[in-house]
Image: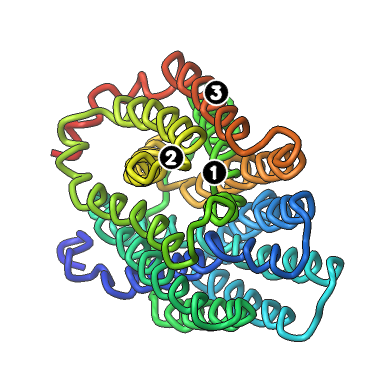
Amino acid sequence: MVNGQYTVTAIPYWRLSGFYFFYFATLGALAPYWNLFLSDAGYTALEIGQLSALLIGTKLLAPNLGGWLADRIGKSLVIIRWALFMATLLFTGFFFFQGYLWFALITAGYSFFWNAALPQFEAATLFHLREQSHRYSRIRLWGSMGFIATVLGVGRLLDVYPIAWLSVVIGGFLAGNWLVALMVPEAPPRHPNPAPVAIWKIIKQPAVVAFFVVALLLQAAHAPYYAFYSIYLKDHGYSATVTGGFWALGVVAEIVLFVYMKPLLARCSLRAVLLASIFLAVCRWLMIAWGAGNLAVLLSAQVLHAATFGSTHVAAIHLLQGYFGQQHQGKGQALYGSVCLGLGGMLGSLLCGYYWELLGAHRIYSICAAVCCLAGLWAWLWVGRENGSQAAAFS
């Protein structure tokens, strides 16, 4: 702290980055391979969809409860550390119990705590960065690095060893995430806002409501990708190693985007970035829907992950920061995690699990493109118009 200013050297860059590395390394083992694990265990597409919806659906409550507790005690890192400890402990239940009911209970338990951690850590990261929020993408890219390392390593592992080893790998990453969280310091206290705005007045603004609707639709459209893309590739003859390569390529593209996000935001408004990302999402789902037999088409579709997740996520984080300010940043991140990522992902997983075998993969991904078209229309009408000059803030 120098003359009341939070200095660059005070930012715990590597500890913040390490948290993202392990959190998304865990996701890198879960997202591409966990449903292959379930399929190998004999679960049907409907059951896999239900378990995926349960994993995502705990985001409806967990982030909000975590945000409320963090605001109440004023120490978000305490909540994050306990949440990750409990997630690790409960995940070990997969080592000892079998059967759909047990899997459902363990999934609900560990994912509840795991999903409570990230929104609060996003808020904690922004509190540490303060006026240097443009550095967020450089920290967040380490999460993408963790994801890549995992999808490539685990893909190779599963081509050599039984898929039963996957639960051990995921449990190890969860434990690593908890240990890193123990090393991250709390952000220094903020000066209280003398006239805080009631959070309900923020939420009911048409632009904020529209933002949440758009984010929910986009997450619902991603659900078949997270739940069934690896199974889709396996059905078309791709090995686990190649499947991991596809997932890794998408995140490599995401990392490149994170590196150049600051100059991009210096030239383009958040609204322009969001609208362009949604348009590319429509293209991506159509390419996956109808190009599974063409390697070049699938590779191109994975490169578009930089837009469908990377730039969309960064735009969302900055829009939330503008909408909710520091006074309600934790609550804003929690609402985004629960309403958009939680409800959107849960509905998408349930619906695609039910209709996957009835409609076929190509129709499911085509519907995802249609949902993104709807999100794009909604965003064009309502989202980000008040941020037309936002680019100047990042120059």
Q: Amino acid at mark 3?
A: Ala
Q: Residues within 10 Å of mark 1 (few under 14, many from 20)?
A: many
Q: Amino acid at mark 2?
A: Leu
In the shown orientation, is residue 126 left or right of residue 334?
left
Could you say which quadrant of the image residue 44 lies in? bottom right
Q: Residue 218: image x %, image y %?
A: 52, 35
Q: Residue 395: image x %, image y %?
A: 13, 38
Query: Which residue lies at the image location 61% right of the left edge and 51% below the top edge?
Result: 227
In the shown orientation, is residue 88 left or right of residue 356?
left
Q: Residues within 10 Å of mark 2 (few under 14, many from 20)?
A: many
Q: Residues within 10 Å of mark 3 (few under 14, many from 20)?
A: some
In the figure, 171 relative to 44: above or below? below
Q: Look at discs 1 and 3 and give the one toward the viewer.
A: 3
Q: Residue 34: image x %, image y %?
A: 61, 65
Which labelled disc corresponds to residue 370? Answer: 3
Answer with mark 1 or mark 3, whichever residue precedes in sequence.
1
Q: Residue 191: image x %, image y %?
A: 37, 54
Answer with mark 2 or mark 1, whichever residue precedes in sequence.
2
In the figure, 117 relative to 87: above or below? above
Work out how far the residue at label 2 is from the one at label 1, CA to CA, in angstroms: 8 Å
User: The residue tagged with tag 3: helix, strand or loop?
Assistant: helix
Answer with mark 3 or mark 2, whichever residue precedes in sequence.
2
Q: Which residue is mark 1?
A: 336
- The N terminus lies in which quarter of the figure? bottom left
Q: Which residue is mark 2?
A: 320
Q: Look at discs 3 and 2 and give the one toward the viewer.
A: 3
Could you say which quadrant of the image residue 153 lies in? bottom left
- Count of number-bearing discs: 3
* Front in this rendered view, residue 257 or 140: 257
Q: Amino acid at mark 1?
A: Tyr
